[in-house]
Amino acid sequence: MLIDFHTHVFPDKLAAHAMDLLSKPIHIRPCTDGTLADTERLMKEEGVTQFVALNIAASPRTERHVNDFAIFLNRTHIAFGSVHPDSENALSELDRLKENGIKGIKFHNEYQQFFVDDEKAFPLYEKIEKLGLIAVFHGGYDPAYPLPYKASPERSAHICAAFPKAKFIFAHLGGLKTEKDTLTYLKNTSAYIDTAFIANAFDAATATKIIREFGAERVLFGSDCPWETPAATIRFIESLPLTKEEKELIYYKNAISLLNLNT
């Protein structure tokens, strides 16, 4: 069994534009055309049992439309919605998402242009914690945005301390280009991390060290499709000196527990 906890899907009418807009600044050729159908094709071909589609409200204006799409996707798949801290409707959107069976929220602090520990977002985190939702954050570097990182491990640790019962996931093994800080600040929190894009961004020794120090029970398989394929991520994980038990936790057992799935 394999659950990909970190994928991105776009409405058919917007997918081509989104792929062009997002891929040019980062100089990465996407592995799908961004549509649900093509994502389903790739996931099936590469042995993914279920995948989580992470949606991002890049601005307050797009928040409701993004969440309408998430609710649509969630009828047949697992989709996360998104809220923006500058939206006057963000708290009510969290209620709407919960009522429609959405299990989590995606934040991308670079796209959304706020620091992860900015207190204007605290009411959102408080409500996410209260509703029992999961929150996934892009961690660390994004090639399309300048320094400083808006979701650095140090800043991310602040919200873990402020909301100790919240289910927070920091993508890319806690943060791209932040390996030392990830172990310094995030390791001893309750945060989860995922494996999105690690085949491109990490060497085997560093990835192994982070996974082992966090504990495999806090690591979720994610590819970051369409920016990386599940197969490439699997090949990288299989190259690491992890036990069968550790790999099973990463590939699907942690996701089943966190998402409360019936299998």
Image (tube, rainbow, N blue to C red):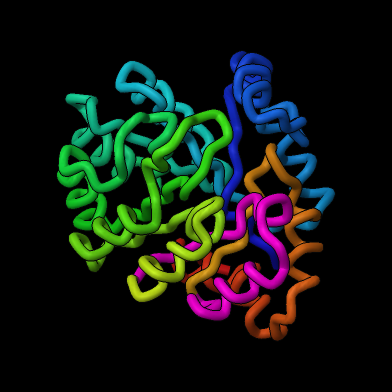
Q: Is residue 201 magenta?
A: yes
- Name which residue lies at 63% across and 68% down: 207
- Name which residue lies at 48% across and 59% down: 174
- Name which residue lies at 65% across and 85% down: 245
Is 191 left, or right, of 213 in this rendering?
Answer: left
In which image quadrant can residue 203 be found? Answer: bottom right
Q: Main secondary structure of the magenta part?
A: helix
* Residue 27 percent across, percent down from the top left: 71, 28
* Residue 71 percent across, percent down from the top left: 44, 35
**Viewer-nearest residue: 62 or 137:** 137
Please determine whether, in this image, residue 28 is positioned above or below residue 14.
below
**Viewer-nearest residue: 113 or 131:** 113
Q: Is residue 127 magenta?
A: no
Q: Quadrant of the C terminus?
A: bottom right
Please determine whether, in this image, residue 123 is positioned above or below residue 73.
below
Is 248 left, or right, of 148 in this rendering?
Answer: right
* Residue 250 percent across, percent down from the top left: 61, 70
Instruction: Give the magenta part as a residue range.
Output: 190-217
